[in-house]
Image (cartoon, rainbow, N blue to C red):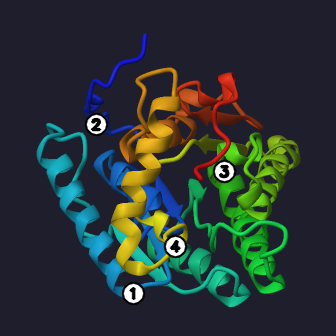
Amino acid sequence: MATNDAPRSVRPTCRFVDKVAIVTGSSSGLGKEVALRLAREGACVTLTGRDEKRLADAKVLCQVEAQAAKEGSAGAIKESGSETFATVAGDLTKPDVRKRVVDETIKTFGRLDILVCNAGVFTSQNGLAETTEEQFDLIMSTNVKASFFLVQLAAPHLEKSKGNVIMVSSILSITHWPAAAVYSASKAALDNMTSQLALTLAPKGVRVNGVSPSYIPTRGVRDWAPSPDKVQETAQQQAAFLGPKHPLHGRCATPEEFGHAVLFLASDESRYITGHTMVVDAGVTLVGAFSGPN
């Protein structure tokens, strides 16, 4: 039976103490939620994004979460006396920025356990006739190419820690929405790449998994909005249109619910899982109800 009950928060478990993570696209939206949840669980995190101010603000929030977690952990999380969070601002479609993300992480923390490839772009609701080559290249370069080469750079460090990679995909990789043909194709490529890289890295003890959420109202809706002043209105319209289509709960997911899935796959609790893309959609793809908003 569908229900609109608000999600219950889950108490932090300190399961990422002494772990180091990179979360791309973590200055806002889902990436920031993942970074905050890792901070609550005791991890050191490198945050990346294009906007330096939002990145700095996200780092401050992570520091607040980490301090609160230490105070409530009954000593499970120790004061390290060293830096717990790092930021790298830049465009991940640039090879030098990708290299700097990994290099800065190793320089600051000395290791890498988790890589969350979350950074992605939508650009706009353009179909076959409207999509430009520039939009096509930007989507593929950000959503697919940047993730592949980040894994390439991170792999030697993940092999040492027996770490793991989480690819953030979308249910649009397995559903249909003509206005998002290129974005959907990029996420389908990411799903396939997840399984291919899982096979490549399994002998090294590195896991590679993905998470495919349905629509979640975040700052990312700016790519869908017709103008900057319509972002909030657009988010509300999309949530009202898509929320009731979800069989379980009858609403869109929260960033927190998405974060739970990512942290599960990143944790030792899923140590026997690799090459899997977890669909987090309250069953909407089971009924074929997601065809995109009008």
The structure residue drawn at horizontal position 32% and vertical position 70%, both measured from the top left corner, is 58
Residue 142 percent across, percent down from the top left: 70, 73
Depth check: give the residue in front, 184 or 141.
184
- Residue under pointer 2: 12
Local crowd size for mark 3, using a 10 Å CA cut-off: few (<14), some (14–19), many (≥20) = many
The extreme front residue here reads: 294
Residue 268 falls left or right of residue 188: left
**Label 4 amino acid?**
Thr
Placement of 112 over or under 100, stated as above or below: above
The structure residue drawn at horizontal position 50% and vertical position 34%, both measured from the top left corner, is 264
Residue 84 falls left or right of residue 137: left
Give residue 55's quadrant in the image. Answer: bottom left
- Residue under pointer 4: 105
Q: Do the residues labelled 4 and 3 touch (CB within 8 Å)?
A: no
- Which labelled disc corresponds to residue 169? 3
Q: Do the residues labelled 2 and 1 touch (CB within 8 Å)?
A: no
Q: Can residue 206 be seen in this view?
A: yes
Depth check: give the residue in front, 248 or 196.
248
Mark toward the start of the polypeptide (2 vs 4): 2
Residue 19 percent across, percent down from the top left: 46, 52
- Which labelled disc corresponds to residue 52? 1
Depth check: give the residue in front, 76 or 174.
174
Disc 2 versus disc 1: distance between alpha carbons? 28 Å
